[in-house]
Amino acid sequence: MDLRIAFSTLAFTDRNLEQAISLGSSLGYAGVELRVIDGKLFDSSLSTADRARVKQTTTAARLPIVAVGSSVILTSDKPGPELHRMLELTNEWESPFIRVYGGHLSEDAETRRNQIESAAKVLEEAIPVAERFGVVMLIETHDGFSASSVAEELLAKVPSKSFGAIWDSLHPHRMGETPSEVYKNIGARTYHVHIKDGRRSAAHKGGWQLVPLGEGEVPVQEVLNQLVAGDYNGYLTVEWEKYWHPEIESAEVALPHELKVLQGYVENAQ
């Protein structure tokens, strides 16, 4: 099973793009997922020069852009125009996938239903654009959609090949779902995977502490077993979230460890 390992630029808060790409490439990562550039979040307003620099830098390093992490929130006010522009940018960078967020969902049943319907409409309106550019939009198991059962609701409403899921290893586990349950819900439409580990901690935001792979309670090996059994052949992105959690180790310390441990998991996957 050819499971290739990429890294997210979320790991780099004080390095420019060239330095981030250089380190990831030198460590042996097979791809990069773009979330921050030069230590900052980006959107479709990125300058023409910077767009070209991203492409030139990754091409020179022979490091494919495996996914573009947008900040588009489907349930926000009028996300469509930015989603369409980001689809164009993703195509420009020759990346197959763009990540979108579902956003937070109301506890009120009717409001929640309307939010999911609205998110589905945004996606449906973007499908012709995505098809034209050859880019697949991916909802991440995150925020109100952290449980794969919720992500599956949206996937069922938008049964297009231009829309799928990113399985984030932490969040469904945090919501009490097992890897087999997640795979049953979204496995057939999982096109990309985020790998991270964590453990319960009352002292940390949201009650969870991010930790190096193998030091937490997230069943990453079981996640990979499910993916291998289902013939998944996409990328696994190490999502070391230094940008959101400045207290964790630097990329220079974390990324070698994450790659080594994840390679071991991949070798043992069955």
Image (cartoon, rainbow, N blue to C red):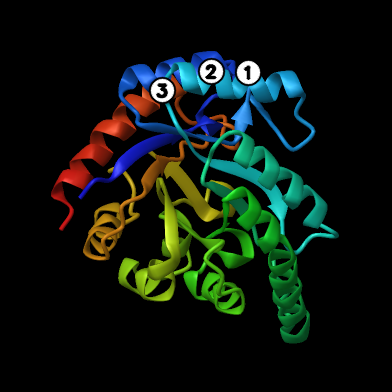
Residue drawn at point x = 45 percent, y = 43 percent: 210
Nearer-N-terminus badge (3/1): 1
Q: Nearer the viewer, residue 144 or 186?
A: 186
Residue 168 versus residue 121 in the image, above or below: above
- Residue 57: numbered disc: 2
Q: Element at badge 1?
A: helix
Whole-number angstrom distance, CA of label 1 to CA of label 2: 6 Å
Can residue 13 be seen from the camera position used here?
no
Find residue 121 and report its image quarter.
bottom right
Residue 165 versus residue 107 in the image, above or below: above
Can residue 229 be seen from the camera position used here?
yes
Q: What amino acid is at disc 2?
A: Thr
Q: What amino acid is at disc 1?
A: Arg
Q: Nearer the viewer, residue 167 or 202?
A: 167
Q: Nearer the viewer, residue 65 or 20?
A: 65
Q: Position of residue 162 (x, y in %)?
A: 56, 61
Q: Which residue is mark 1?
A: 53
Answer yes or no: do the residues labelled 1 and 2 have beta carbons within 8 Å? yes
Whole-number angstrom distance, CA of label 3 to CA of label 2: 9 Å
- Residue 124: numbered disc: none
Residue drawn at point x = 35 percent, y = 55 percent: 218
Q: Which residue is mark 3?
A: 62
